[in-house]
Image (tube, rainbow, N blue to C red):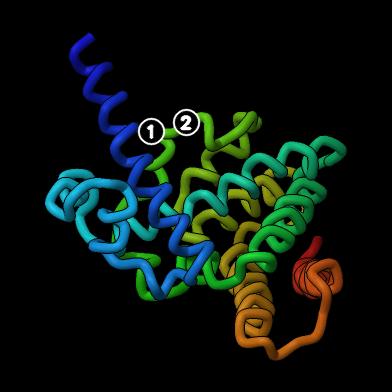
C-alpha cells in the first residue's frame, strides 16, 4: 500500500511538471522551456522539480512523450487490416510519418537530436508510470514502442518480415539504414521548411521511397 501511494504521488507530481512544460512548448516553443519557468507554472520551486527529473533534458523527453501518445493511440487503426508482416511494416511507417510530420521538431529531438541518447530507458520509465499512454497494442508491436532508439524500433519490425520470408536476414542492416535515411531526410526538409508538401503528400512520398528501398532487397 505504501509503495502504491508513493507511485501515485510521483505520477501526480511529475504530471504537474510535464503539463507545465507542454504548456510552454505549445505557447512559446520547446526552446523556451526552462526549469524555472516550468516550476513557476507548476506552482513549485526548482528544487522540487529536481526530485523527479535529472535535468532539463530529462524533463523535455517526458514532455515530448505527449506527441508519441497520439501516434500510439492511432497505430491500432492503421494496423487492423494488415494481412502480413510486410503490410504491418508499411502501415506502422505510414502512421509514424503522419504524426511525426505534424510535429517535426519534437520527433527530431526525440529520435535524432543531441537529447536522443542522453537519457537511458526514458520511454520504458515513462510507460511504467503512465501505462495507459500506450493505448491498446498487440503483443508483437509493444516491444517496438518501448524502444527509444529509432534504429532498434525499425529493426524489430523488419525482423518479422524476415520471419515471413519477405527479405533475407543478411540484408536487414542495409534496408534499415536506407529507410532511416529516407525518413530523416524528409523530416529535416519539413523541419527546415524546404518543401511545400502537405502532410499527406509528404507521407505518400516517404512511403513510396521506403517501398522502393525495400523492394530492391525483396526475395
- Left-right relation of 109 to 60: right
Task: Say which residue appears at 27% left-offset and 16% top-offset.
Answer: 4
Q: How many marks?
A: 2
Q: What is the number of the mark on residue 131?
A: 2
- As helix, strand or loop, the secondary structure at mark 1 comes to helix
Q: Quickly name the residue at label 1.
A: 128
Quadrant in which the N terminus appears: top left
Task: Say which residue appears at 37% left-offset and 40% top-offset.
Answer: 15
Give the vertical position of 35 relative to 113 (above or below). Answer: above
Task: Say which residue appears at 52% left-offset and 49% top-offset.
Answer: 66
Q: Position of residue 124 (x, y in %)?
A: 39, 42
Give the vertical position of 207 relative to 81 (above or below). Answer: below
Give the vertical position of 29 relative to 61 (above or below). Answer: below
Quadrant in which the C terminus appears: bottom right
Task: Say which residue appears at 48% left-offset and 71% top-offset.
Answer: 29
What crowding class fits label 1: few (fewer than 14 Cα within 10 Å), some (14-19), or many (20 or more)? few
* Residue 203 visible from this viewpoint: yes
CA distance for labels 2 and 1: 6 Å
* Circles 2 and 1: CB atoms closer than 8 Å: yes
Q: Nearer the viewer, residue 174 or 14?
A: 14
- Left-right relation of 7 to 210: left
* Residue 171 visible from this viewpoint: no
Tell me which corner region of the image, top left, top right, bottom left or bottom right, holds residue 12: top left
Amino acid at each position: 500500500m505504501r509503495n502504491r501511494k508513493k507511485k501515485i504521488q510521483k505520477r501526480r507530481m511529475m504530471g504537474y511538471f510535464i503539463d507545465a512544460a507542454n504548456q510552454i512548448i505549445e505557447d512559446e516553443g520547446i526552446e523556451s522551456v526552462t526549469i524555472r519557468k516550468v516550476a513557476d507554472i507548476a506552482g513549485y520551486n526548482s528544487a522540487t522539480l529536481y526530485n523527479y527529473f535529472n535535468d532539463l533534458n530529462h524533463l523535455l523527453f517526458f514532455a515530448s512523450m505527449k506527441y508519441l501518445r497520439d501516434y500510439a493511440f492511432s497505430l491500432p487503426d492503421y494496423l487492423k487490416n494488415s494481412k502480413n508482416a510486410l503490410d504491418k511494416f508499411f502501415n506502422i511507417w505510414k502512421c509514424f510519418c503522419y504524426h511525426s510530420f505534424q510535429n517535426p521538431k519534437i520527433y527530431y529531438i526525440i529520435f535524432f537530436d543531441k537529447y536522443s541518447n542522453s537519457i537511458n530507458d526514458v520511454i520504458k520509465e515513462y510507460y511504467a508510470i503512465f501505462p495507459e499512454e500506450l493505448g491498446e497494442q498487440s503483443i508483437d508491436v509493444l516491444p517496438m514502442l518501448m524502444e527509444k532508439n529509432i534504429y532498434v524500433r525499425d529493426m524489430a519490425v523488419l525482423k518479422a518480415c524476415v520471419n515471413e520470408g519477405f527479405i533475407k536476414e543478411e540484408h536487414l542492416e542495409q534496408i534499415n539504414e536506407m529507410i532511416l535515411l529516407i525518413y530523416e531526410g524528409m523530416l529535416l526538409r519539413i523541419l527546415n521548411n524546404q518543401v511545400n508538401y502537405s502532410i499527406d503528400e509528404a507521407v505518400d512520398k516517404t512511403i513510396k521511397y521506403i517501398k522502393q528501398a525495400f523492394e530492391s532487397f525483396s526475395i
